[in-house]
Image (cartoon, grey):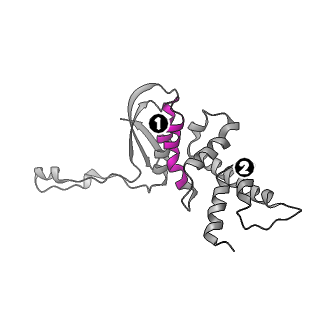
Amino acid sequence: MKELKDIQMNLQRVFKIKPQQASLYLQSLAIREDVIFPKSKRLAVYQNGYIIRMTESLKDDFPKVFKYFKKDTHNDIVYEFLKKFPSRYNSIACVSQNFTRFIATKYKKHKFLGDLAQLEWLECLASYALTTEPFDFTKVQLKKAEDIFKIKFKISPSVHLMKSNWTVHKNKIKRATTYLVVFKNKEGLQTEAV
């Protein structure tokens, strides 16, 4: 009898490969064979569902990046990504954090894609953050003029800064050093060049 830990590890290996390649691992799984519905087909249901859901999630987080790839390659990109950066999180949202590194290293020929992925990831982080009220400067009361230098500001958790060699915040991407701030306010998600 195999331990649960071994079964889980083998199942995770199967999810990282394409269903056609899964037969190598099927022998190591403690799944009962069935004549009518073989274990390879039963397992493929979960494999395909996992890849479909991961593809949907990544396309939601990185819509602009995925526009640069043909639709029929999206699942292959996700397979490759999950091989290199397997999910170690209980939340599907956390899986996306390594996609920027994957894109930047895998697609070096299209150098702007790494920066575009980074911008979209910062937009995700900003959208997850709590919206804070803007500071009201009219409420500041100083006893002495020098006290102005003692004021400390706390930046909203939604604010993220980025330097890019590309104008990834624009529709037409060109090579140019750009500094961006991504944040969320009452109007929604904002990306501004500074």
* Residue 158 in sight: yes
Report the residue at 79% width, 61% height from top. 39
Q: Which amino acid lies under the numbered mark 2 shown in the image of this protein?
A: Gln
**On the rendered structure, is 71 left or right of 84?**
right
Report the residue at 53% width, 39% height from top. 103
| Residue 2 placement: quadrant | bottom right
Q: Which numbered tag is attached to residue 21?
A: 2
Name the quarter where the N terminus is drawn: bottom right
Asked whether 189 falls inside the magenta stretch, the response is no
Residue that label 1 marks: 115
Above or below for 130 versus 190: below
* Residue 188 in sight: no
Q: Secondary structure at mark 2?
A: helix
Pointer 2 local density, CA inside 10 Å: few below 14, some 14–19, many at least 20: few
**Direction bottom: furthest residue:** 1
Q: Residue 83 placed where, x, y %?
A: 59, 49
Report the residue at 64% width, 71% height from top. 4
Marker count (numbered)? 2
Pointer 1 local density, CA inside 10 Å: few below 14, some 14–19, many at least 20: many
Report the residue at 48% width, 43% height from top. 101
**On the rendered structure, is 113 left or right of 142?**
right
Q: Residue 79 placed where, x, y %?
A: 64, 46
Name the quarter where the C terminus is drawn: top left
Q: Nearer the viewer, mark 2 or mark 1?
A: 2
Q: Secondary structure at mark 1?
A: helix
Depth check: 148 or 161 in front?
A: 161
**Direction right: furthest residue:** 36
| Residue 74 placement: quadrant | top right
Depth check: 114 or 106 in front?
A: 106
Q: Which amino acid lies under the numbered mark 1 shown in the image of this protein?
A: Asp
Bounds of the magenta segment: 94-119
